[in-house]
Image (tube, grey):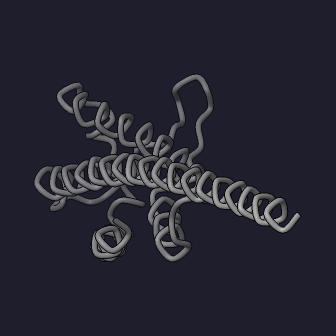
Amino acid sequence: MELFFKYIVQTIIGIILTYLGYIFGRKKQIDEIVLKEKVALLQKICSKLEEIHEGYIQLYEFWQKNFGHAEFYKAIEGFKKRYIYDEERKIIEELIKKESELHDLYKKSIVFIKPSFRKKLKKYLELGKFSYQHDDIGFYNTYYENFFKNLLEKYNQRLKLFKELEKEFHKLI
């Protein structure tokens, strides 16, 4: 009888140890998957953020070189009317599209990324928001005017916040 209890205790201990091994092994696999997803998401966010920031710098420098000396509203009219600025208009459209993509990545990041980084990223995205009016027939449209106002007014804030995001990004990995 004593031998029987000894055998049962050893069997139960074996089952418990097997179960615990399975649980901890599974947890390790899950942790590895989560880490891979986190790193992949962070890489996408960093890449998209870098592209957006470079776009803002390029457009800011473009504005300063071509229109920085002129009165703002006359410069905007010149920008809107001249076909030679089609490339810059495309850059603006791509920039807005990339910001939308970054916003989607921001929404996915809630599970993986520290709140302090997410807060700064959200603030950076909010710096790019602007409103505009148009009449749908082409007589009245303030899109480029308000885009460049936003760019010029918030440029230094954007630079400072980008540097903060860069520093914090390296702490996340």
Q: Splitting the image into 4 quarters, where does residue 162 fall?
A: bottom left
Q: Residue at x 46, y 71 (%)?
A: 117
Picture mark count: 0
Q: Nearer the viewer, residue 11 or 158?
A: 11
Q: Residue at x 45, y 57 (%)?
A: 128
Q: Nearer the viewer, residue 22 or 119?
A: 22
Residue 107 position in % (x across, y down): 60, 51
Residue 153 shows in the view: no
Which of the image's four quarters has the C terminus? bottom left
Q: Splitting the image into 4 quarters, where does residue 13 fall?
A: bottom right
Q: Splitting the image into 4 quarters, where does residue 21 fall?
A: bottom right
The relative height of residue 97 versus residue 161 in the rendered view (above or below) is above
Q: Residue at x 53, y 59 (%)?
A: 112
Locate residue 35 relative to residue 170 in the image: left or right.
right
Residue 108 shows in the view: yes
Locate residue 103 relative to residue 19 in the image: left or right.
left
Locate residue 158 relative to residue 57 in the image: left or right.
right
Q: Nearer the viewer, residue 51 or 106?
A: 106
Residue 115 position in % (x across, y down): 56, 73
Which residue, as the protein is rendered here, is positioned at the far left? 65
Residue 74 position in % (x across, y down): 30, 50
Q: Residue at x 33, y 35 (%)?
A: 80
Q: Nearer the viewer, residue 85 or 33?
A: 33
Residue 67 position in % (x across, y down): 19, 53
Which of the image's four quarters has the N terminus? bottom right
